[in-house]
Image (cartoon, grey):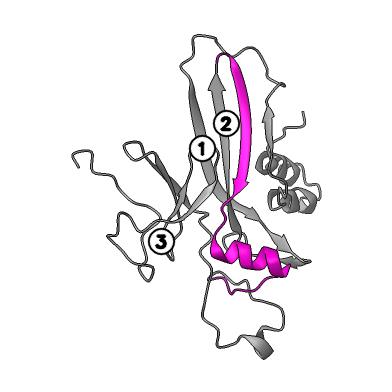
């Protein structure tokens, strides 16, 4: 069999004693396009009485810029959304439009240090003392249904407010002005069901 999940192909290649490097590289390949489509290749059927809903997840998604490899944890965040409604499934993905993402897209190259090892080219000449890292929004999602807010978190800054249906980035979220733009909020929050 040829499973489509890259990590499983990697494990199978390793167990078989074959060259695992192509599968390893596939696990860290970027999906550069932002897509919207109906999922038509489905094994079996989606039950028509299945309640409508959406599954969302985020994670690192952009592992290379201008030929420079970006550490997997430093990569720009991407959200994927699968919605099931009326027996149909649709897919949508979007990159989180953080300030750092926009700056690097405009420049066409890595401009920020990453806490896990990514450095701009010619770092020693241009940025050895530059301690600014970018908020990637690539670690977690929290949905706040009362406010219809989807928050994309990262360990080193404030979360980004995302439209849960279109996945449009609305901007940095200061959590109702409980924080300011200098604060750092955990990417692994707990929600109090009483408040």
Q: Nearer the viewer, residue 35 or 156?
A: 35
Total count of labels:
3
In the rendered image of this protein, does residue 132 appear above or below residue 33? below
Dot placed on the residue nearer the N-terminal end, 3 or 1: 1
In the rendered image of this protein, does residue 118 appear above or below residue 83? below
- Residue 136 in the figure: left or right of residue 120: left
Residue identifier under label 1: 56
- Outermost residue to the left: 194
Contact (CB < 8 A) between labels 2 and 1? yes
Residue under the image location 56 percent in, 69 percent down: 116
Contact (CB < 8 A) between labels 3 and 1? no
Q: Nearer the viewer, residue 173 or 110?
A: 173
Residue identifier under label 2: 82
Q: Position of residue 10 (x, y in %)?
A: 71, 45
Magenta region, residue range: 86-114
In the rendered image of this protein, does residue 40 appear above or below residue 63? above
């Amino acid at each position: 069999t040829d499973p489509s999940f890259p990590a499983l192909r990697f494990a199978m290649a390793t167990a078989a004693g074959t060259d695992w490097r192509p599968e390893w590289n596939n696990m860290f390949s970027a999906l550069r396009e932002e897509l919207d489509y109906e999922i038509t290749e489905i094994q079996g059927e989606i039950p028509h009485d299945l309640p409508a809903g959406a599954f969302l997840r985020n994670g690192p998604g952009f592992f290379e810029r201008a030929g420079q490899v970006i550490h997997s944890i430093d990569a720009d965040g991407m959200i994927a959304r699968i919605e099931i409604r009326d027996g149909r499934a649709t897919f949508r993905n979007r990159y989180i439009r953080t300030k750092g993402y926009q700056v690097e897209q405009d420049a066409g190259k890595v401009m920020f240090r990453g806490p896990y090892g990514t450095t701009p080219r010619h770092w020693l000449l241009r940025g050895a003392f530059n301690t600014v890292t970018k908020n990637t929004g690539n670690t977690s999602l929290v949905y706040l249904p009362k406010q219809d807010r989807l928050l994309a978190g990262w360990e080193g800054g404030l979360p980004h407010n995302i439209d849960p249906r279109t996945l449009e980035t609305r901007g940095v979220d200061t959590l109702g002005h409980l924080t300011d733009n200098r604060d750092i909020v955990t990417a692994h929050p707990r929600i109090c069901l009483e408040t």
